[in-house]
């Protein structure tokens, strides 16, 4: 089955700097890769996703890149702000199968220092 | 759109009690719902996949008789933790996907914090 590894587990950056979180996956059949932001005690919120037919996707200060050959994908947050502080989870899913399952990475606790 | 409501948000009960958690898709039909458990400072672990009108598919290591899942309609799935014990204390979160091709993101409920005394 799919295994997703996420690094780093904690990340602290100065406000205004960029943050990068990296994930690797094991199942070459996976073709959908969402990123979720979870604030303490709250639901995971989808912030951006990418499908395997695309190499990069950007939404304002957030971008995601995907390297299918190497089986890794990354989240990039530019011009970080205090409200970006949260736990971020990457995930991978194999779509189009009988039982689509999201497999999450271990999470990255991002702290933005003012 | 794509709002998922989960109730209750917080439960405290005595050991041995059964607890039911509801997950509703408010503005879309969810052919598939998922139940996750999240321990403090850990990732979300899938417990089971629930398809409307059929039996749930449980992940390895999850007790079917302990965590009863019912998905009776396209907008409602329930998780019942039977005879709960302190080790069942956790944050339980459901998610739902729209019907169709399957190429749809999962939308999460607010979660239920379960504390067993």
Image: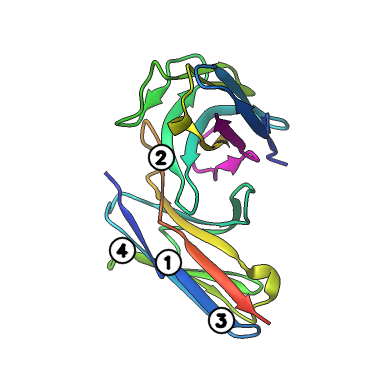
Majority secondary structure in the magenta region: loop
Mark 2 element type: loop
Instruction: Say which residue label 1 marks.
Output: A9
Residue B116 forms part of the magenta stretch:
yes
Of callouts 4 and 2, the N-terminal one: 4
Residue nearer the viewer, A45 or B105: A45
> What range is drawn magenta here?
B100-117
Q: Where the N terminus of chain B falls, by quadrant? A: top right
Q: In this view, does A52 lie above or below A83?
A: above
Pointer 2 indicates a residue of which chain? A
Residue nearer the viewer, B32 or B45: B45
Instruction: Say which residue label 3 marks.
Output: A13
Q: Are marks 4 and 3 on the same chain?
A: yes
Instruction: Say which residue label 4 marks.
Output: A71
Q: Is residue A13 above or below residue B32?
A: below
- In the displayed structure image, the side of residue B76 where residue A22 appears, left or right: left
Mark 4 element type: loop
């Amino acid at each position: 089955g799919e295994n997703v590894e996420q690094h780093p587990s904690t990340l602290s950056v100065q406000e205004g700097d960029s943050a990068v979180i990296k994930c690797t996956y094991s199942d070459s059949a996976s073709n959908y890769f969402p990123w979720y932001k979870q604030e303490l005690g709250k639901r995971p919120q989808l912030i951006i996703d990418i499908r395997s037919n695309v190499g990069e996707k950007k939404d304002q200060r957030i971008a995601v890149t995907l390297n299918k050959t190497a089986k890794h994908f990354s989240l990039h947050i530019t011009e970080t702000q205090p409200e970006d502080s949260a736990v971020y989870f990457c995930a991978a899913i194999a779509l189009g199968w009988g039982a689509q399952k999201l497999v999450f990475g271990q999470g990255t606790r991002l702290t933005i220092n003012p | 759109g794509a709002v998922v409501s989960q109730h209750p948000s917080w439960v405290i009960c005595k050991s041995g009690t059964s607890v039911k958690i509801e997950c509703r898709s408010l503005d879309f039909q969810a052919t598939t719902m998922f139940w996750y458990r999240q321990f403090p400072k850990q990732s979300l672990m899938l417990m089971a996949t629930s398809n409307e009108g059929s039996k749930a598919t449980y992940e390895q290591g999850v007790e079917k008789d302990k965590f009863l899942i019912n998905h009776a309609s396209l907008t409602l799935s329930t998780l019942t933790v039977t005879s709960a014990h302190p080790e069942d204390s956790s944050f339980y979160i459901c998610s739902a996907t729209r019907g169709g091709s399957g190429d749809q993101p999962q939308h999460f409920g607010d979660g239920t914090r379960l504390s067993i005394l």
